[in-house]
Image (cartoon, rainbow, N blue to C red):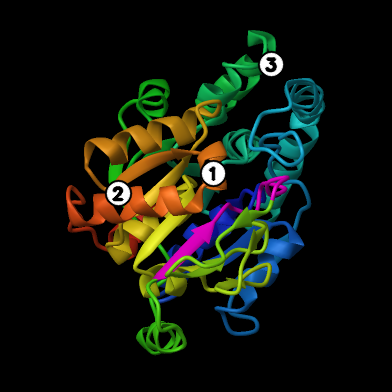
Amino acid sequence: MRIAWFISDHGYGHIMRNTPLILETLTRPGVELTVISAESHLEVLRRYVRPGQVEMIPFEKMDYGLEVIPGTLLIDVPRLEEGAAAYIADFDRRAAWAEQLLRRGGYDRAVVDMPVWALLGAKAAGVESVLITNFTWVEIYREYLPDSLVEPFRRAYRAADRVLYYELSNPQYRALLPGGEDCGLTARPFDPVKVAAIRAAHRQPIVFCSIGFSNQGLAKSLQAGGLPYDFITTAELAMEGENVTRLGPVEDMQNYAAAADYCIAKAGWSTVAEILLAGKPAALMGRDTVAEDRMTIQQLKERRAAIKVQVDELADMAGVMARLVRFAENGFRPGHYRNNAPFIVDRLLAGH
């Protein structure tokens, strides 16, 4: 069975959540994989696979995504409208490229995490497609863009032959593409040795902080100095203090979530999945302007798995930590989640 795997390059969350699925797929006999994504994302994947184990085809700007006002998490609507229009105008070229790739390569299936033009290309090539995600751009763009720019996405998503819903999938995604299958969570596996080493390097409770790589960070530095915690932050989050460690651009973030006592994060699905699988209490940055984040946080609040904090509240890190500690001690309900990669791959390969 030959699979072409199309992965969004909007932030690193998509490659992170697909990596465990790719690794699991490689354990199945008779399966050959080609992964299509941006070179920077393929470079991440190369850290986990042996040379020649997976064919990789670089394709820059796989997905359009969102535009944020620098120094904030707010949507830059004029830039978003201009960029989305340009992206849509390129659908036909991209779909034709995907169709040609699938035909010439004799592929049996296209797995798609977000790039909608790949679904159109698969349909034209007569190759079965499987869309796997937790949201679509339709529910996000409809709040900012005219319907003339949303409808092309809506039509493209409907080209999917089968649909898988990740845990925490948005209700609007389910409504747009009904009849899909629930498939749970997945994340890169925790490394107990690395987790233990992280914990051993810190004497105070650890707070892992992540803002995601699809953003440009926050304009103001956050002050954490003097607090009785050790903060470990991703590269894009500016935090200052003698108790702060900033990570490089791409690390094994799942191990830091597992090593932490508390997490503060933007509500991107991959980060949330790692936090849930690690069983850690979290404060998630409210971004009511983005449907995916808003709906994810609402579901997690209802499950008592996280609290919501506004970005402006991060200026008072002592206050945020006081709330988070209270929540952890009185109200936090860690769920019994598992890394569902084997089951998800079963569904991706179903019918062959």
Quarter that holds the C terminus: bottom left
Q: Residue furthest front?
A: 226
Q: Residue furthest top?
A: 147
Query: Residue, x 73% and y 21% (percent of image)?
Result: 77
- According to the picture, the residue beneath numbered tag 3 turns out to be 149
**Labels 1 and 3: the sequence-earlier one:** 1
Query: Residue, x 39% and y 31% (percent of image)?
Result: 295
Q: CA distance from mark 3 to mark 2?
A: 30 Å
Q: Is residue 83 above or below residue 102?
A: above
Please say whether residue 60 is visible from this viewpoint: yes
- Name the one closer to the observer, 254 or 72: 72
State whether the magenta stretch is mostly helix, strand or loop.
loop
Q: Amino acid at mark 3?
A: Leu
**Labels 3 and 2: the sequence-earlier one:** 3
Q: Is residue 89 above or below residue 114?
A: above
Q: Quadrant of residue 202?
A: bottom left
Q: Position of residue 318 (x, y in %)?
A: 45, 54
- According to the picture, the residue beneath numbered tag 1 turns out to be 127
Q: Does residue 211 belong to the magenta stretch?
A: yes
- According to the picture, the residue beneath numbered tag 2 turns out to be 183
Q: Are marks 3 and 2 in contact (CB under 8 Å)?
A: no
- Structural crowding at the residue carrying mark 3, measured as other residues with C-alpha within 10 Å and reported as few (<14), some (14–19) or many (≥20): some
The residue range painted magenta reads: 206-220
